């Protein structure tokens, strides 16, 4: 496609990203003097953060018992169960208590939409299609939070992440342009231990072919910013469609 035609089609995409990137760069400068903003600076620089032992193990055992209700023959690489409101609120309380919610707010903004909050199970199958290719989520800068439940070795599928890529301006017209099966750049590999919390910005390239077979159990939460330069714009009609589609909640 002609570059000018492409630019004219994609200027909203670009504007949203430029706005986010420059806001973060200005924030980073203002945080230089504050020691307690180290985590936030790392998230802005790298696109991901790894916190160790933040969620009580007995609570995670309870979640596993309650939500790990799958028939193995139905599981095809991944299977999920939605968390109920009470459990979700308890998780939010832990995240607030450990100041992780504060970091999410500082990175994305005060007004957030949260959805796709699930118990998430990976089985022993291999795959190299769809989400099992390096990709960005085409949802602009938003955060996924992984709470690790299972005891895993390096035989399990890690979170793969291209460090810093969340600040790169991208354009895409279709799904194929969000997948990078031929990626040759080195991706960081992040494995959690039970109770760990890992957050990453899904605008940066993440994931990779799944060739490891040790099953993995995590909780996955999703947070989108609400704002006039965000995908969820309080003044646009499309906002209602997105909210209805996901059925999440504004927090
Ligand atoms: Fe993704």
Image (cartoon, helix red, strand yellow):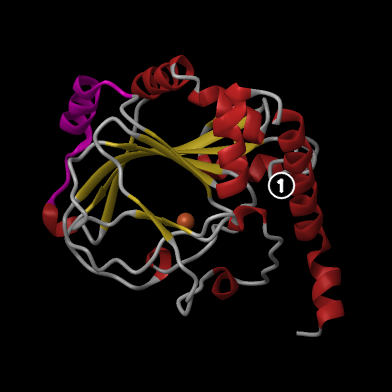
Is disc 1 placed on a helix, strand or loop? helix
Residue 41: x, y in percent? 61, 37
For image coordinates 55% across by 75% down, the residue present is: 176
Rendering coords of residue 128 (x, y %): 34, 73
Q: Relative to 247, is 74 on the left or the right?
A: left
On screen, residue 55 above or below 128: above
Res 226 quadrant in image: top right
Q: Would you say residue 251 is visible in this rendering? A: no
The reply to whether residue 93 is visible in this rendering is yes
Residue 166 vertical placement versus 181 (above, below): above
Query: On the rendered image, what quadrant is the N terminus found in?
Result: bottom right
Horizontal and vertical percent for residue 35?
61, 24
Over which residues does the magenta segment extend?
55-71
Q: Nearer the viewer, residue 46 or 78?
A: 46
> Principal SS element in the magenta part?
helix
Q: Which residue is mark 1?
A: 238
Label tally: 1
Relative to 34, residue 13 above or below = below
- Residue at image x 80%, y 39%? 228
Q: Specify whether 190 is left or right of 67.
A: right
Residue 12 x, y percent position in the rendering: 80, 57
**Which quadrant holds the C terminus?**
top right
Q: In the picture provided, is 56 more to the left or to the right than 103?
A: left
Taking the spot 83% from the left edge, 62% from the top edge, the residue there is 11
């Amino acid at each position: 496609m002609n570059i000018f035609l492409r630019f004219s089609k994609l200027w909203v995409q670009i504007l949203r990203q430029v706005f986010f990137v420059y806001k973060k760069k200005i924030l980073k400068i203002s945080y230089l003097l504050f020691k307690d903003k180290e985590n936030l600076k790392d998230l802005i620089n790298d696109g991901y953060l790894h916190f160790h032992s933040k969620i009580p193990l007995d609570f995670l055992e309870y979640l596993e018992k309650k939500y790990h209700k799958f028939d193995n023959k139905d599981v095809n690489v991944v299977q999920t169960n939605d968390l109920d409101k009470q459990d979700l609120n308890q998780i939010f309380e832990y995240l607030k208590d450990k100041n992780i919610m504060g970091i999410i707010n500082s990175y994305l903004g005060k007004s957030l939409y949260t959805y796709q909050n699930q118990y998430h199970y990976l089985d022993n199958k291999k795959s190299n299609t769809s989400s099992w290719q390096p990709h960005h989520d085409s949802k602009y800068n938003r955060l996924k939070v992984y709470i690790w439940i299972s005891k895993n070795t390096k035989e399990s599928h890690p979170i793969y992440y291209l460090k810093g890529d969340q600040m790169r301006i991208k354009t895409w017209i279709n799904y194929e342009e969000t997948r990078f099966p031929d990626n040759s750049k080195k991706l960081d590999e992040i494995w959690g231990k039970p109770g760990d919390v890992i957050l990453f910005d899904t605008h940066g390239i993440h994931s990779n072919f799944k060739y490891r077979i040790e099953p993995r159990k995590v909780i996955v939460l999703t947070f989108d910013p609400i704002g006039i330069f965000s995908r969820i714009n309080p003044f646009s009609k499309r906002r209602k469609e997105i909210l209805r589609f996901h059925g999440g909640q504004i927090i």
